[in-house]
Image (tube, helix red, strand yellow):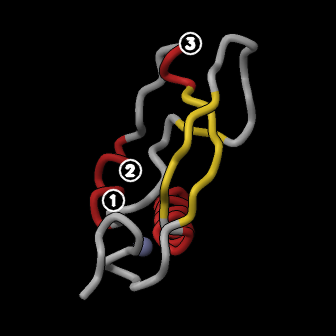
Amino acid sequence: MIDRNTSCELHNVPLIKRTMYDSLKVMNVDPTGEYMKYSWQFPHHTPFNFSETKLYDSEEPVTIVSCTKCDEELRKVLDASLDK
Ligand SMILES: [Zn+2]
C-alpha cells in the first residue's frame, strides 16, 4: 500500500522535503495557461509559486514536500509546449 503522504502514487517514489520560498506572499504571480493545463497530471509537483531562491528579504522559508519525478515530468511537458 502506498502512503500518499510519504510517496508519490503516480511514480511510486518517496517524496522529498525541501525548504523553499513562497513568492505569492510578496508579489502577485499568475500561473501560465500551460501550467493550469498540465500540472494537475502530476499530483506532487512543486507549486509554481515556490522557489529555492529567496527573492525578497521578507520571504519566510516553508517546507515543501514534493516528488522529483513529478517536477521533472511537468517541466518537460511545459518545455515541450513552449516549442510549439
Ligand atoms: Zn510523482
Which x, y percent locates residue 78? 49, 59
Is residue 80 at all visible to an observer of this figure? no
Local packing at callout 2 (Cα closer than 10 Å; few below 14, some 14-19, many 20+) is few
Is disc 3 placed on a helix, strand or loop? Answer: loop
Q: Is residue 60 left or right of residue 84?
A: right
Q: Is residue 18 left or right of residue 1?
A: right
Taking depth in this image into account, of 73 and 13 the one nearest to the observer is: 13
Q: Which residue in the protein does label 2 denote?
A: 34
Which x, y percent locates residue 12? 39, 85
Can you say whether 73 is above or below 31 in the image?
below
Is disc 2 placed on a helix, strand or loop? Answer: helix
Is residue 11 at all visible to an observer of this figure? yes
What is the CA distance from the residue labelled 2 to the residue labelled 3?
Answer: 23 Å
Ligand 1 lies under 8 Å from the Cβ of mark 1:
no
The residue that appears at 48% across and 23% down in the rendered structure is: 29
Say what amino acid the circle numbered 3 marks. Answer: Val
Is disc 1 placed on a helix, strand or loop? Answer: helix
Local packing at callout 1 (Cα closer than 10 Å; few below 14, some 14-19, many 20+) is some
Q: Quadrant of residue 47?
A: top left
Say what amino acid the circle numbered 1 marks. Answer: Tyr
Q: Quadrant of residue 19?
A: top right
How many badges with numbers are in the image?
3
Say what amino acid the circle numbered 2 marks. Answer: Glu
Local packing at callout 3 (Cα closer than 10 Å; few below 14, some 14-19, many 20+) is few
Q: Which residue in the protein does label 3 denote?
A: 26
The residue that appears at 48% across and 59% down in the rendered structure is: 66
